[in-house]
Image (cartoon, rainbow, N blue to C red):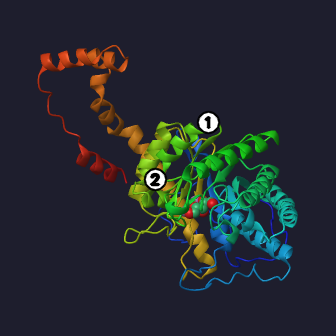
Amino acid sequence: MSNVLIGNQEFFKGIGKIGYEGPESDNPLAYRWYDENRVIQGKTMKEHLRFAVAYWHSFNANGSDPFGGPTLFFPWDKNADVIQRAKDKMDAAFEFFTKIGLPYYCFHDVDVVDYGNDVAENEKRLATLVEYAKEKQAASGMKLLWGTANLFSHERYMNGAATNPDFQVLTHAAAQIKAALDATIALGGENYVFWGGREGYMSLLNTNMKREKENLAKILHLAKDYARSQGFKGTFFIEPKPCEPTKHQYDYDASTVLGFLREFDLMDDFKLNLEVNHATLAGHTFQHELQVAADAGLLGSIDANRGDYQNGWDTDQFPNNINEVAECMLIILEAGGFAGGGINFDAKIRRNSTDPADLFYAHIGGADTFARALVIADNILQNSDYKAIRSERYSSYDSGKGKEFRDGKLDLQALRDIAAASGEPEVRSGKQEFLENLINRYI
Ligand code: XLS
Ligand code: NI
Ligand code: NI
């Protein structure tokens, strides 16, 4: 990779390019499992995992929380000029991308440059930074996994964006989506995400849910039609989340979004971007959400992070649980990988992680967790009884009367007659503990 320090400042001083050193390495600034060139099932790790760095958490999130202000004082956030400040931040971002050695990044419009209240001025600012990003992508080889519009932070969106009861607010959402689509297309973005942070309600007493959902679907159709008319060939992703910041978010979970896409005829262009911590907020395991999406052919992309078992909220910590991630990789591998997307680290370092190196440790740990899980899952699929046990469990449907039932050849009376003639079924174990031990054996 060539030098990408176009701005001529080094923000992460003393940290060089992170390389792969193998599981025996003691170097905390090296990959122990993520070897981008290692081939598994005919694809490199880089191609399987398609890691992305999230601009918002890595270069904007300053450690503030509902109880206190910033703790992370970024050296790229100092210049008084809005455009220069945004360029400094982009310099820092691309320096980080290049040093961490992950192939993709993702951003919201307002992550790259501050927006004001003037639509035309915002469009101009974003376009300026898009030109700058183009140079940086060309110099570094970085690619954009997806772009999106932040339709939840500005106070005008307090009652929703595309689901706002006020048409005037909806038009502002549309303006932001249009500019974010233009930016994504200009940067060769491979996908576009809709996360409806405030597309829901705080109280049903003041909400016409039916109308809000219809408006949301209309905006999604208009966005898709506009992007396609501008030559966008990528996939649109909806990112489910049950709540937070709203009490109830319409894109509650994978099954709910699936129903929504079907109801509003969006199945051809939209897939899912699933997030670990959102699954747990919805009362599901992440494995459950992945399987629902995979079964529907909608497993587009994931936002990798983790929550905290002892509290409920979206803590967005970096992934580190090998057992859970290995079970997830089993589902992802069996589904044939991501449909267009990849693994975006929608995760942030903690408020008291104040060393520049902490951002590196976080991404190294996350990437190594997934890479190791990929190796484990591949090993389980190739060398264990895992698949055979599951297919054997359903084998009574593969031949004879079971197959006739599957083929729609038996009616209710016929099923009754089989039951009456064959008597009580044999007792069969589900072998859950055996399978749990099998996963641990391969870790
Ligand atoms: C918030 C979401 C958000 C989306 C992008 O919980 O995860 O970060 O991924 O708008
Ligand atoms: Ni989230
Ligand atoms: Ni997310």
Q: Quadrant of the C terminus?
A: bottom left
Q: Are marks 2 and 1 in contact (CB under 8 Å)?
A: no
Q: Which residue is mark 1?
A: 265
Indicate the secondary structure of the residue bearing disc 1. loop
Inter-mark Cα distance, 2 to 1: 36 Å
- Quarter holding the N terminus? bottom right
Per the image, label 2 sits on a secondary structure element best described as helix
Kind of residue at badge 1: Asp
Q: Is residue 435 above or below residue 108?
A: above
Q: Which residue is drawn at the image coordinates 41% and 40% (left, top)?
A: 381
Where residue 328 sits: x, y (%)?
44, 50
Residue at 47 percent of width and 55 percent of height = 372
Q: Which residue is mark 2?
A: 373
State the image coordinates of residue 346 (x, y, percent, origin top left). 58, 62
Q: Position of residue 21 (x, y in %)?
A: 56, 62
Q: Is residue 169 visible?
A: yes
Q: Note whether 249 is above or below 225 in the view shown.
A: below
Kindly indicate the quadrant of the structure image that contains residue 56.
bottom right
Q: Residue 199 vs residue 315: left or right? A: right
Q: Which mark is residue 321?
A: none
Q: Is residue 19 left or right of residue 168?
A: left
Looking at the rendered structure, the kind of residue marked 2 is: Ala
Please state which of residues 369 and 199 is positioned toward the viewer in this rendering. Answer: 199
Q: Position of residue 133 (x, y in %)?
A: 81, 61
| Residue 402 in the figure: left or right of residue 128 | left
Q: Where is residue 62, by image quadrant?
A: bottom right
